[in-house]
Amino acid sequence: MDELEKALSIALTGEARAHALQRFQKQMAKWGIALPKAEPFALDFGLGKFESIGLVESWIANEVDAGYCGKYLFVIDGQTCPAHHHLSKHESFFIVQGRVRMVLDGKEFEMKPGDILAIPPQSKHCFTGIGPALLLELSQPCVIEDNYFEDNRIPIGGNYRKRDCSR
């Protein structure tokens, strides 16, 4: 299974997916943001709480052999990408539009358009939209098993062990 297929295993489907992607595409049009041809997907991280824990991802590239990844990450107001870290992945976030409350290794701060944040491996991080926000992630390749989520109910990543998790 490739990395995109693994990510899609925790993506929304059906009407919830359609609604999330419609909102995303409407906001991108409002901002005048060109999107990659690849189909975006909406993640609720398997928790069933998309409005508060989730995001929309639009992958530009995930070139594992070449050593790089680029993707847009979109959150709505109050929506959080959950706390996690990577053992080996280094990533940089660039705020394209909107504002986010970022938490990096326990330090909280606000980021606005034009701000850049490099996140070294093993640094715990999460971010929350302050209104709708679009981030550009530039990083080493996305390898799903290199995601270690603080919430062990998230059914994916290096620290996930198969068990019965109530949503």
Image (cartoon, helix red, strand yellow):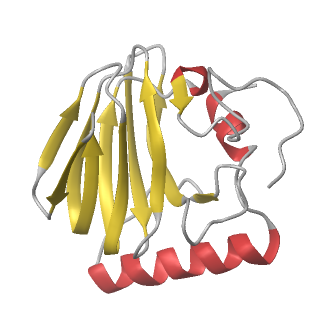
Q: Vertically, is 125 above or below 144?
A: below
Query: Horizontally, is 83 left or right of 108 in the view?
Result: right
Residue furthest front in the image: 106
Residue 23 point in image, percent of width and height:
52, 81
- Give the quadrant of residue 132: bottom left
From the viewer's side, name the closer residue of 166 and 36.
166
Number of residue marks:
0
Residue furthest right in the image: 164
| The C terminus: image quadrant | bottom right
- Give the quadrant of residue 156: top right
Residue furthest left in the image: 114
Q: Vertically, is 117 above or below 55?
A: above
Give the residue at x 76% y 25%. Answer: 1
Residue 165 point in image, percent of width and height:
83, 43
Residue 158 point in image, percent of width and height:
62, 20
Give the residue at x 41% y 55%. Answer: 73
Q: Vertically, is 21 above or below 8?
A: below
Query: Horizontally, is 76 left or right of 2 in the view?
Result: left
From the viewer's side, name the closer residue of 62 and 116.
116
Residue 103 point in image, percent of width and height:
28, 46
Give the residue at x 16% y 58%. Answer: 111
